[in-house]
Amino acid sequence: MSQLATATTAPDQIAYLDAAAATAVGVEYKQRFVDALGVQPGHAVVDVGCGPGTDLGRLADAVQASGRIIGVDRDPRMVAEAGRRLADRPTVELRTGDAHELPLADASMDRARMDRVLMHVRSPAHVLAEVRRVLRPGGLLGMAEPDWDTLAVADEDVRTSRRFARFVAGRVRNPTIGRELVRLSAQAGLQVRSVEAIAVVFRDFDTADQILGLRRNSARAVLAGELTDAEVQPWLQRLAEGPMLAGFTFYLVIAQA
């Protein structure tokens, strides 16, 4: 395998999710997310697209022994890892299932959350309708999604930075989903209670590279003919040498059934 092709290899998805959650902004917004949902003892909560169970423990703490947490993910590997991590949590139940057809009864949940899930799904509108179905009247849905069209990387070579950002956004199924959450929620019959725009800012090259894939995605852009290696290499070197600044907008929306 060529050096360029090797550079495009995606990281392990579980490792990537763990790394993103461990960043300062990841820790902060995840706590804000739970607080905004108002999870209470005794609540039934579903985490749609729970991944390796990153947030299930925090939710289980909030509902206490009288509540229950259901984690749903379509990837059996994620469900298995979540099961391993949450084996000592009797209030946590895991189910393999698709967000478009949730394995849950009508009006069975007090709270639902989706964290960076709608950006990947086939039909965000269908998923929101499903979540609306499983929520009890008055139940809350929390959604946290990026708007990849807002990605910006600061460098003197503005053209390369812009083309890199457009390439990254183009690789996401629903790149502007963050700004669409309010409209889609209303179409699903949900009442939007709050909208928060969070600026995700990177000042450290290694963290930005880990989360944004600066090296990986620029190598992919070269292979795709969107950028040249002669443009990318000095661009990456300047970013690595600093000062580094990159970021995008992340939307946190709470809606009520």
Image (cartoon, grey):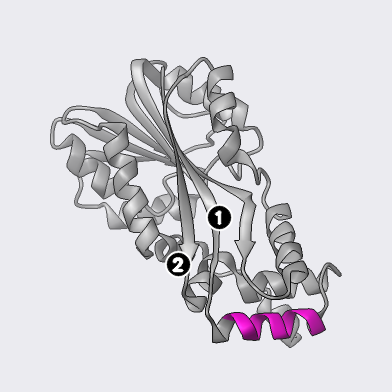
Residue at 25% x, 47% y: name it: 58
Residue at 34% x, 49% y: name it: 30
Residue 90 in view in this figure = no
| Residue nearest the viewer, comparing 176 with 125 | 176
Q: Secondary structure at mark 2?
A: helix
Q: Residue 37 vs residue 80: left or right?
A: left
Spatial CA span between label 2 and label 1: 22 Å
Q: Look at the image and say whether residue 234 sits in the magenta stretch.
A: yes
Residue 184: quarter of image: top right
| Residue nearest the viewer, comparing 95 with 22 | 22
Residue lying furthest left in this view? 65
Residue 61: quarter of image: top left
The residue that label 1 is drawn on is 248
Residue 27 in view in this figure = yes
Does label 2 or label 1 sit earlier along the sequence?
2
Q: Which residues are magenta?
A: 230-239
- Which amino acid is tagged 1? Phe
Mark 2 surroundings within 10 Å by alpha-carbon count, few (fewer than 14), some (14 through 19), many (20 or more): few
